[in-house]
Image (tube, rainbow, N blue to C red):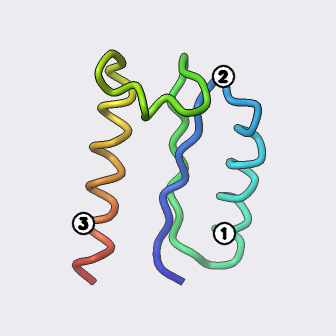
Amino acid sequence: MPPALVVTAGFDPLRDEGETYAARLQEAGVKTECVRYEGVTHGFVLMAAVLDEARKAIADMGTALRAALKK
């Protein structure tokens, strides 16, 4: 399996499920990073025009994707 980046939001009703998924990937031996962005809601990455956390998450996802594609 390729490495995974799991992004969750502090005020997301699916946060716990996302973080459980990340933990299970790790248990299965998949290199996984789980990042929670506090203070934001589900779908926050769509608000990059107004949220610093969204811009940071998008940059972090790009970094993770570039690293995965280098391998």
Alpha carbons under labels 2 and 1: distance apart:
23 Å
Residue that mark 1 sits on: 25
User: Of callouts 3 and 2, which one flags the residue occurring earlier in the amino acid sequence?
Assistant: 2
- Report the residue at 53% width, 64% height from top: 32
Q: Disc 1 vs disc 3: Cβ atoms closer than 8 Å?
A: no
Alpha carbons under labels 3 and 2: distance apart:
28 Å
Q: Say which mark, if any, is on residue 11.
A: 2
Find residue 68 and report its horizontal and vertical position in percent. Answer: 33, 73
Q: Residue 14 sits in which quadrant? A: top right
Q: Quadrant of the N terminus?
A: bottom right
- In this picture, is 65 found above or below 34? below
* Residue neighbourhood size for the residue with mark 1, other residues' Cα within 10 Å, grouped as few (<14), some (14–19), many (≥20): some
Marker count (numbered): 3
Secondary element type, mark 3:
helix
Amino acid bearing label 1: Leu
Q: Say which mark, if any, is on residue 70.
A: none
* Residue neighbourhood size for the residue with mark 3, other residues' Cα within 10 Å, grouped as few (<14), some (14–19), many (≥20): few
* Residue neighbourhood size for the residue with mark 2, other residues' Cα within 10 Å, grouped as few (<14), some (14–19), many (≥20): some
